[in-house]
Amino acid sequence: MALVTTPAIVLSVIKYNDTDAVIQTFTAQTGFTAFFVRGFYKGRKSRVWKAVFQPAALIEIVFNYKNKGQLEHFKDVRILYHYKNLYRDFDKLNIATFLREILLESLKNEQGDMALFQFIYKKFVALDQEKFDPDFHLKFLLQLTRYLGFFPDLQTEGSYFDLQNAVFTFQIPLNPYLTEAETKLFRDFSGMIFAAKKNIKITQPDRKKLIDMLIRFYRYHITRFQIPKSVIILHQIYE
């Protein structure tokens, strides 16, 4: 058992019973970690816990890490960054909810990774502070693949994108792939993010297509990846 002090992001709050909750987090030092919070719904510190453990909250947590696959119990916790706009801006909140669900599905088997956590931390702070970008979630998903180990290989060429091998090819792959039209949009967007190519104008229909393509991409690389429920809301926004 080791005493750990680590930054973390709150990914979900699950009701354990009428009084207590389970908080699922991703921490820089211990990776995906779930905490049992007694008195979350009822008790003298209920308001404090609800304020600290809000979904997407960026916190610092201190706990004795048992590392036995069981629920951990924290000794101390504090907010690292206080959101100024995220919870009040409808568009930003919807994006944050979607990204949080993506992280919950993507990081369940991830170990501690400071670089990955810093990427997540900086992106959520940017989402809060900067002017709303309707393509923010698309850029986030694509950039996240670099940390998860399956980012697109832009050194390859072709009319089709092989979803399993993350390469472009001129021959129709035996693996699941993107069509020629999908591949062009996917490559142009990937080039804008990874290769500093000129910005392309993303239309609302294109955003819906890119979300669907990126989720398909994730599903081929992450075991038991479930489509986030909030994607339906995003699609409705982009109608």
Image (cartoon, rainbow, N blue to C red):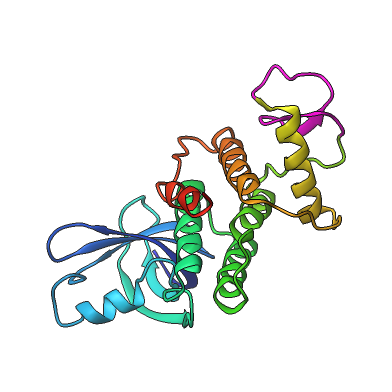
Q: Is residue 5 left or right of residue 174?
A: left
Q: Nearer the viewer, residue 52 or 123?
A: 123
Does the magenta-highlighted stretch encompass residue 219? no
Q: Nearer the viewer, residue 58 or 113?
A: 58
**Main SS of residues in magenta:** loop
Q: Is residue 136 left or right of residue 41?
A: right
Does the magenta-highlighted stretch encompass residue 174? yes
Residue at 62% in and 75% down? 131
Taking the view exactly as shown, the residue that stands out farthest to the front is: 239
Across the whole image, how many numbered discs are drawn on residues? Answer: 0
Q: Is residue 56 left or right of residue 178?
A: left
Look at the image and tell me whether residue 109 can be seen. Answer: no
Residue at 75% in and 49% down? 189
Residue 60, above or below 102:
below
Q: Position of residue 198 (x, y in %)?
A: 86, 57
Residue at 70% in and 16% down? 174
Q: Nearer the viewer, residue 208 or 137?
A: 208
Residue 175, above or below 204:
above
Task: State which region is magenta.
Answer: 157-176
Look at the image and tell me whether residue 147 can be seen. Answer: yes
Q: Position of residue 144 (x, y in %)?
A: 63, 53
Residue at 35% in and 77% down? 52
Taking the view exactly as shown, the residue that stands out farthest to the top is: 174
Residue 23, above or below 83:
above
Q: Position of residue 29 (x, y in %)?
A: 52, 64
Q: Quadrant of the N terminus?
A: bottom left
Q: Position of residue 63 (x, y in %)?
A: 37, 71
